[in-house]
Image: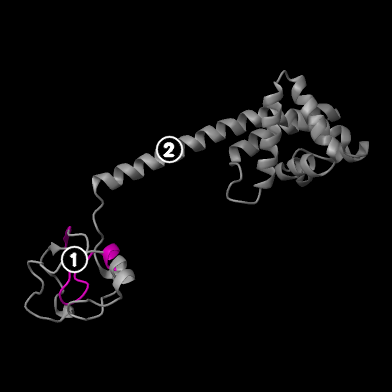
Amino acid sequence: ARLHSGNRRASCGNSEAGNCNEPEPDLCTVCLQPCTSKACACAFMHSQCAESYAAAYGASCRICSRPFVQTSTLCKRPRDEQEEEVEQRALKLLQDREARERAHNLAWAEQVAPCAAKILCRHFEYSSRHLQQTTPQSPELSFGAVLLSLVYSEPEYLDDLSERLSERMLTGEAVDEHIRRLHGIAEGLHSSSSVDQAVEAQFMRLFNEHLAAEAGW
């Protein structure tokens, strides 16, 4: 924080900040940009600048020694073009990354969901009567339940999944990537890194279609 003591209108004829309800515009003591709010009897500051100043030097002015007013009552520092450009560029990069990740996850769902349906239909020890009563909307067949069953139930599930993915003419590298993505998505089911609803919906639509076909519903 920079201390600027040469404000053209450091006071407005009265040393008490409380009597300066509408001060004339001046320069912010910290950033030296135009400012219309006074943080104390002698210093103009933006809200953000007052917070930075207080964090560095304390919550009172080093010139008049008076405590600063509540920073929420001060005007905001205008955003300059460079700040906006940096933020817009960062937002664009984030959106592009999210779009690529969504595309990868949708492609993953299209390959893995049909294989998962065959594996779980064959390996789960369901009776024929239980299979007939199970519907695609059953909580037992939620997205999370399917993934966790593949990853943690039996070791052969993942071996079976690798074989079935290979049968879909995928390369060994692609198969390994799908298995890694399965682990990553399963581990992030209850975190902020979980996949979006479009991926879950696509996966479960394909899974339920192939499970119904396998079970003969």
Residue 168 shown left or right of residue 88 in the figure = right
**Is residue 44 covered in magenta?**
yes
x and y percent of residue 155 in the render?
Answer: 84, 39
x and y percent of residue 135 in the render?
Answer: 79, 39
x and y percent of residue 109 in the render?
Answer: 66, 32
Q: Residue at x 73, y 43 (%)?
A: 142
Q: Residue at x 76, y 44 (%)?
A: 148
The disc placed on residue 16 is none
Q: Please state which amino acid type lies under the numbered disc 1.
A: Thr
- Which residue bears the numbered disc 2? 93
Residue 114 shown left or right of residue 104 in the figure = right
Disc 2/disc 1 C-alpha distance (Å): 35 Å
- Which residue bears the numbered disc 1? 29
Range covered by the magenta-colored residues: 33-50
* 3 and 11: which is toward the camera: 3
Q: Please state which amino acid type lies under the numbered disc 2.
A: Leu
Q: Are marks 2 and 1 in contact (CB under 8 Å)?
A: no
Q: Quadrant of residue 47?
A: bottom left
| Location of residue 163 with respect to 149 vertically, above or below | above
* 136 and 99: which is toward the camera: 99
